[in-house]
Image: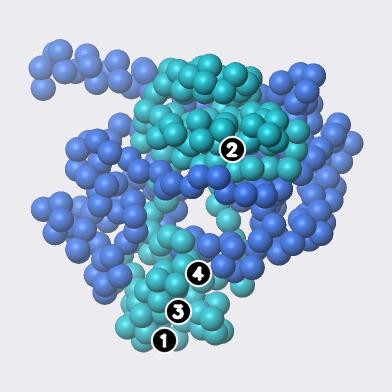
């Protein structure tokens, strides 16, 4: 390794740490990792040895595929390997975006608590737009119908307690566009 | 969907092994044959009971930038603004919601600067203010829907 590439590596590490503090974490992936992402982003092969099939596509061994994916799991690039149900097909037809006005100094603590509720699929801290949009904590809930969704709102309200300075639920009434996310190199 | 399908969905929502014969492992846990699991899973994907099966990537960690954006669209202008917003390939999802801020879309770009660029184009073309709400912190992503 030349001195120059050694320096580049160090700069990359610094950049990574700085970005992490901005909540914009990026993980360094090599070309093989990127090809692996491309090959698996639409799903795993439905064959007895799925990782072997991916390995063949990449021209590497199956143990390398497994160890690369394990590494991506550990660094959070892969959130998890799992089945994702189509909530409409399963009867969860009321999808509500619940939004909460909580004190900024408590949003992290409360966000973690709300995120732990098993009916919450996404939970984020987002900026307010005062005065018309006072909400800084977002939690998506999925229920069979709107009444059931409102009961889930009550459960979240219980968790937030006295720090709930106002909340609302926004139901989706129409999907205007839905395309999957795709990553290309 | 029968009780075996339900068991499969409930188990696979929680995770899938990284091993040489992962379907065999899961099938043994369920007390069924490996081929049965693969057949059932294929069927659940085909009939769209499952929308995905495989690794879920954190797009932001792969280098992308994302934001949730809201607009207050007058009812009489809704179709025109929908057309403008949807015409941007950076708009990944767009939902109508029952609120005064009644259009909510997700932007996916390869850099944060592009998020701002798309937003200002949407503002210019629609004549409406956009409310850009990128995530500041993430507490949880994932879903377990018991069936």
Which quadrant: the C terminus of chain B?
Answer: bottom right
Mark number, residue B49: 4
Q: CA distance from mark 2 to mark 3?
A: 51 Å
Q: Which residue is mark 1?
A: B32
Residue B61: x %, y % from top left: 40, 35
- Work out whether A9 lies above or below A61: above
Q: Which chain is cyan?
A: B
Which quadrant: the N terminus of chain B?
Answer: bottom right
Label 3: chain? B
Are tags 1 and 4 found on a single chain?
Answer: yes
Label 4: chain? B
Q: Which residue is mark 2?
A: B79
Q: Which chain is blue?
A: A
Label 2: chain? B
Residue A47: x %, y % from top left: 26, 72
Q: Which residue is mark 3?
A: B29
- Work out whether A105 lies above or below A119: above
Sequence-wise, the earlier of marks 4 and 3 is 3
Nearest-to-viewer mark from 4 and 2: 2
Residue drawn at x 75%, y 30% is A135
Nearest-to-viewer mark from 3 and 1: 1
């Amino acid at each position: 390794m030349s001195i120059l590439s050694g320096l580049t590596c160090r700069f990359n590490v610094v950049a990574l740490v700085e970005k992490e503090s901005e909540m914009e974490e990026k993980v360094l992936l090599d070309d093989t990792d990127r090809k692996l992402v491309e090959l698996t982003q639409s799903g795993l092969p439905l064959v007895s040895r799925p990782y072997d099939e991916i390995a063949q596509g990449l021209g590497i061994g199956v143990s390398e595929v497994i160890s690369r994916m394990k590494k991506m799991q550990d660094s959070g690039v892969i959130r998890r390997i799992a089945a994702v149900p189509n909530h409409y097909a399963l009867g969860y037809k009321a999808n509500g975006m619940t939004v909460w006005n909580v004190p900024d100094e408590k949003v992290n603590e409360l966000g973690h608590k709300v995120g732990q509720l098993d009916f919450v699929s996404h939970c984020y801290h987002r900026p307010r737009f005062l005065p018309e949009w006072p909400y800084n904590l977002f939690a998506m809930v999925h229920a069979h119908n709107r009444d059931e969704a409102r009961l889930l709102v009550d459960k979240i309200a219980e968790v937030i307690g006295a720090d709930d300075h106002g909340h609302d639920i926004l139901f989706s009434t129409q999907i205007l566009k839905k395309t999957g996310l795709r990553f290309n190199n | 969907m029968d009780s075996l399908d339900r068991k499969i969905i409930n188990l696979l929502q929680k995770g899938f092994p990284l091993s040489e014969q992962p379907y065999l492992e899961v099938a043994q846990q369920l007390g069924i044959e490996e081929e049965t699991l693969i057949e059932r899973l294929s069927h659940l994907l085909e009939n769209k009971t499952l929308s995905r099966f495989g690794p879920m990537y954190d797009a932001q960690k792969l280098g992308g930038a994302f934001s949730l954006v809201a607009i207050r669209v007058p009812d009489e202008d809704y179709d025109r603004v929908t057309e403008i917003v949807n015409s941007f390939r950076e708009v990944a999802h767009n939902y109508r919601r029952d609120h005064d801020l009644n259009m909510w879309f997700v932007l996916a770009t390869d850099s944060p600067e592009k998020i701002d660029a798309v937003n200002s184009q949407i503002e210019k073309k629609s004549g409406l203010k956009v409310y850009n709400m990128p995530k500041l912190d993430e507490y949880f992503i994932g879903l377990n829907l018991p069936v």
